[in-house]
Amino acid sequence: MPPTFGLKTTPMHLPYADIRRVWLEADEFPQIRDAWLWDHFLPLAGPKNGDVLEGWTLLTALAAQTTRLRLGLLVTSNRIRPPAVLGKIASTLDVISGGRLIMGLGAGGTQQSTGLTGVPGPNPAIEEYAAYGLTLVPPGEGVDRLRETIEILRRMWTEEEFDFHGRYYTLDRNRNAPKPIQQGGPPLLIGGWGNRMLRLVAQYADLWNISGPPHTDFGTLADRIHRLDAECERIGRDPATISRSLQQIVSYDDPAATRAIVREAVGLGFDHIVLSLPRPYPERAVRWLVREIIDPFH
């Protein structure tokens, strides 16, 4: 089976009108199943004082103007919003979108070694979180907090009222209405590559996402797939019940190179490819994407 495809527009150094243009065009092409934003407040590349639009606000605006695309953040940082606040935001957006939200989640800002985040140089979350009064936590704590968030979200989306008393979060008589349109809540995508994160993916996720080359080489991708399969087998889950999603930057100058990466990724077992568009976006960018990258696989 050929993979399914999504696209990602990174709202950094770009005006809202350009992002809106691409999303409205993508909504017209059924070859694009879903569309994604990110969850950062400062640029990760280019001028440090450049524009960055907040992810969930922008996603809501785009959800209200599209009719078909599944949509989400790739991925939401669990370190920015309290879990129950995030659950309310996501419930509202699922209603606004008519049940099209995919809940993309990641551990968020943690204390990482230089270059480990896939961005050259020091961990960019250090500057970003300091600027916005947020705190970095050790990776293990980040995963444990994410586990509690997932439980809170699922209970908010399915239960009328509940208490939650975890190690990091406490809720008393949480009530969340309206519920998401999607029965049981939006499907859960978890982004990450570490062993602890893959254990979480095996236990909870409907989709798993990881970045492709140059951020992650094919040897590492293959190793992470095998690790996820092993974690699924350990808990008795069929690995085939988790969609494997690769985020891949597109080359406008060499689409054949992008197609080759996608082909190799599909050979490894990835069934969903998110094509990340570099800025600036050309006119009819989605038409080009479908013609040069997606249609050859169908």
Image (spheres, grey):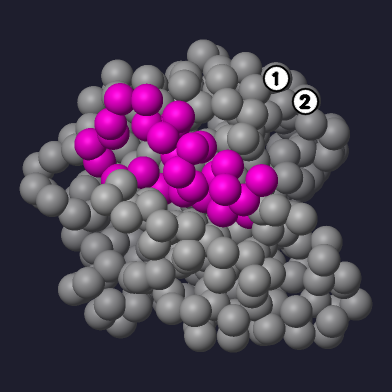
For this view, does 184 lie left or right of residue 147?
A: right
Q: Which residue, given by chain and number where applicable, does mark 2 sit on?
A: 181
- Marks 1 and 2 in Cβ contact (< 8 Å): yes
Mark 2: which amino acid? Ile
The answer to if 282 sits in the magenta stretch is: yes
Q: Which one is in front in this view, the residue at disc 1 or the one at disc 2? A: 1
- Of the numbered discs 1 and 2, the one sitting upstream in the chain is 1
Q: Which residues are magenta?
A: 272-298
68 to 135, vertically: above or below: above
Q: Residue at x 18, y 73 (%)?
A: 121
Residue 256 lies, in percent from the top left, at 41, 57
Tell me, for residue 231, which label it has, or none.
Answer: none
Q: Residue at x 64, y 29 (%)?
A: 30
Q: Residue at x 77, y 68 (%)?
A: 203
Residue 135 lies, in percent from the top left, at 33, 61
Residue 172 lies, in percent from the top left, at 70, 43
116 to 39, vertically: above or below: below
The answer to whether residue 179 is seen in the rendering is no
Q: Which residue, given by chain and number where applicable, does mark 1 sit on?
A: 98
Q: Nearer the viewer, residue 109 or 190?
A: 190
The answer to whether residue 260 is seen in the rendering is yes
For this view, does 132 lie left or right of residue 19?
A: left
